[in-house]
Image (cartoon, helix red, strand yellow):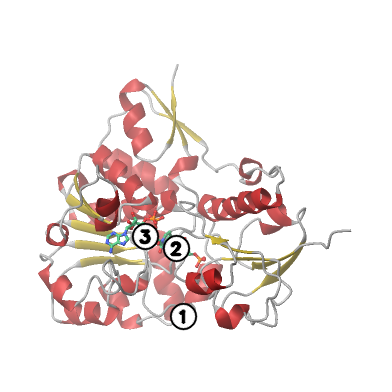
Amino acid sequence: MAQELHFFIEDSLLYAEEFFSSLGKITRFKGRDVTAEEISDADYLLTRSTTKVNESLLNKCSKLQFVGTATAGYNHIDAQYLKGRNIPWSSAAGCNADAVADYVLSSAFNLANKYGFLVSDKKIAIVGVGEIGRRLNKRFAAIGCEVVLYDPVRAQTESDFQSASFDDVLACDLITCHVPYVKEGPYATHHMFNEATLLKLPKQTILINACRGEVVNNQDLLSVFKQGHSLHVVLDVFENEPNIELDLLPYLEFGTPHIAGHSLEGKARGTEILYKLVCKRLGIEPTVLLEDLLPAMAINRMELTREYQLSQRQYRALMNLVYDIRNDDLDFRMGLAKAPESFDLLRKNYAIRRELTSLKVECDKSLYQTFTDLGFNTRLLD
Ligand SMILES: NC(=O)c1ccc[n+]([C@@H]2O[C@H](COP(=O)([O-])OP(=O)(O)OC[C@H]3O[C@@H](n4cnc5c(N)ncnc54)[C@H](O)[C@@H]3O)[C@@H](O)[C@H]2O)c1
Ligand SMILES: O=C(O)[C@H](O)[C@H](O)COP(=O)(O)O
């Protein structure tokens, strides 16, 4: 009889039992504390971003067949080491891209309300035009913004993609970062925003970092703030998580504990993507469906009548109904004020959050395309 497969799964993977219990035995572990001894029996190792997958973690795994991370980013995985041991691995590309796009749009609309401007008047730079950047391009274009795309990596391999220059990016009103963390090489993203680049930004520029903390030099950012350079900065990610630079907090417009991608749908899709990959490897048909696991939304459906006028006020109201970044910012500040070392705990106890993609919006032809591009789950009214 074939030996039962042993799945070692980080404790933060959502719906892991529902997806994997029929495929083998499951042992859960804590990402930041896991040891090589603890996972030495693994056939399959499934993680999120807090498990550092490298030689010191895997050196006791003799029968490991596959490593998967239920996240979009994969800089916590030592791909070279896995290649050397011939162990295949995968991330969950695109799983939480809509959640991050919601986060960026909520930032933009709530800042517009606070400072009295129209998002549609702003020139937007998207740094890194992959899963998240593509969605944001559609959403900002649907609002009527001029969008500048910066992705020299795509420009090099795709003949129909043209990248703006980095100087074009620095001249935009709102810059939003969606690149992987790459430490070195021609397309390194390490400290892309440092004192020199930050000081080039015109005053009042909005800078959003929801990719990896190391893309913005946090000490340089603090120094630029202290010099009185007034920027509107939103940080979901920080250098040196979970021990972040707390002195930055008072200067930030919105700060959150690395939760931009933490919608229920985003986390669940991450696990689902790995489930489908494992089923494929095992040569079996997937039987567990994500749609059977996700609960209905509290407000599930909206009908926009002919009276509905698309305006910033209306869109912001709909957006905030689903996701309002101000609540997460408040929880973050209150949580850290009570316990400065609670970054991980705030992530662990993060409230259930849904995506625009789950809100069914019924409207007629005149609004259908715009609302689809804005990220809603749109249906045409008869
Ligand atoms: N805060 C969160 O919760 C959260 C959630 C999802 C993803 N992320 C982070 O955001 C990153 C982007 O996510 P994605 O799903 O869009 O990934 P993706 O791989 O689909 O897109 C990344 C894009 O960045 C481009 N790129 C790479 N190096 C670049 C450089 N030097 N300059 C400009 N562009 C460059 C790539 O060509 C690619 O098009 C992930 O790698 C991850 O680290 C964070
Ligand atoms: O790269 C990603 O997908 C995100 O940063 C992801 O949300 C990280 O989540 P974590 O595994 O830390 O919960």
The residue tagged 2 is 73
For ligand 1, the image quadrant comes to bottom left
The residue nearer to you, when weighing 243 against 52, is: 52
Q: What amino acid is labelled 2 in the image? A: Gly
Q: What amino acid is labelled 1 in the image? A: Lys
The residue tagged 3 is 326
In the rendered image, which quarter contains the N terminus?
A: bottom right
The image position of residue 261, as x and y in percent, is 45, 58
The image position of residue 310, as x and y in percent, is 27, 33
Instruction: State whether label 2 is within 8 Å of ligand 1.
Output: yes
Residues under numbered marks 3 and 1 in contact, where contact means CB atoms less than 8 Å apart = no
The image position of residue 76, as x and y in percent, is 48, 72
- Residue 224 visible, this angle: yes
Residues under numbered marks 2 and 1 in contact, where contact means CB atoms less than 8 Å apart = no
Q: Residue at x 35, y 81 (%)?
A: 246
Relative to 208, 260 lies left or right: right
The residue tagged 1 is 338
The disc, 2 or 1, on the residue closer to the chain's N-terminal end is 2
Q: Residues within 10 Å of mark 1 (few under 14, many from 20)?
A: few
